[in-house]
Image: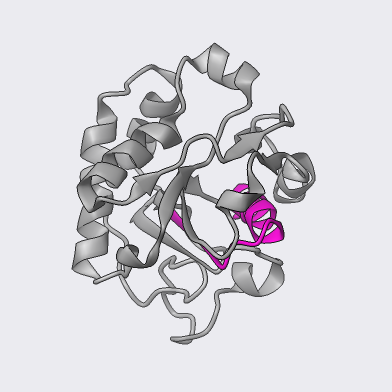
Amino acid sequence: MLNIPPFCPKCSRHLGTHPKNTKCMNCSRAELFFDFAWCACFFEDPLKDLIHQFKYNQKTQLSGQFSKLMVHFIKEYHMDIEQFDFMVPIPLHPTRKRERGYNQSFLLASQLSRIFNINLNINLLIKTKNTKNQSLLSKKERWTNITGAFKIKNPNEVNNKSILLIDDLLTTGATSSEAAKALKSAGAKTVGVFTLAGTKLER
């Protein structure tokens, strides 16, 4: 279940037979605005089903177990999480949050913030565009769907800061990249992404 090296230096997904220390095909093809991403686990069953329960079936208690997997990844591979000034969960649009009742990314981020003693900023990044569900769209549609979806509430808090975005899943990287683009435009020095799971690379 835990992601294993060799990692893509950009998205950290398992390279398999790809040449080491080179970006995977996905990252080579796309313009990604985050500096790097960490994916703690492979997006496959039984974790895949548990993430679905976590996001859509009110199984919020899973955040504790999921955060332990993310912590294990950091410690196992000695990832430099202390470089970040604060964590920011990928936000939901207010309409989506009312429908779901919670933001799963916030639940993960709050656990990680406490464990690693890194500040959590939940009001900095806001989602102003009520996008379609990314999981229902094609790869090309995902990029179009998420374009311009995020805004920065207070740019002064971002300038020259190192920020770690927290989310449950990395697929195309479109959502994380668009959030990172907003942060970089506001002056962020470094934007990393840390997700519970990542989909397997295309072959």
Q: Residue at x 62, y 55 (%)?
A: 180
**Number of callouts:** 0
Q: Residue at x 25, y 70 (%)?
A: 77
Residue 10 placement (x, y as % from top left):
52, 72
Closer to the camera in the image, 176 or 112: 112
Closer to the camera in the image, 55 or 120: 120
Horizontal relation, residue 32 to residue 80: left or right: right
In the image, residue 14 sits, relative to residue 170, either above or below, namely below
Closer to the camera in the image, 190 or 103: 190
Horizontal relation, residue 148 to residue 68: left or right: right
Colour scheme of this structure image?
A: one colour
Q: Residue at x 69, y 41 (%)?
A: 150
Q: Quadrant of residue 159?
A: bottom right
Judge whether residue 129 is colored magenta.
no
In the image, residue 47 sits, relative to residue 4, either above or below, namely above
In the image, residue 173 sits, relative to residue 189, either above or below, namely above
Closer to the camera in the image, 96 or 156: 156
Horizontal relation, residue 41 to residue 193: left or right: left
Image quadrant occupied by the C terminus: bottom right
Residue 140 placement (x, y as % from top left):
76, 50
Can the viewer see residue 168 in this picture? no
Q: Residue at x 37, y 67 (%)?
A: 83
Can the viewer see residue 160 in this picture? yes
In the image, residue 200 sits, relative to residue 147, either above or below, namely below
Residue 21 placement (x, y as % from top left):
46, 86
The magenta segment: 173-194
Horizontal relation, residue 85 to residue 201: left or right: left
Judge whether residue 175 is colored magenta.
yes
Residue 33 placement (x, y as % from top left):
65, 63
Q: Quadrant of residue 181?
A: bottom right
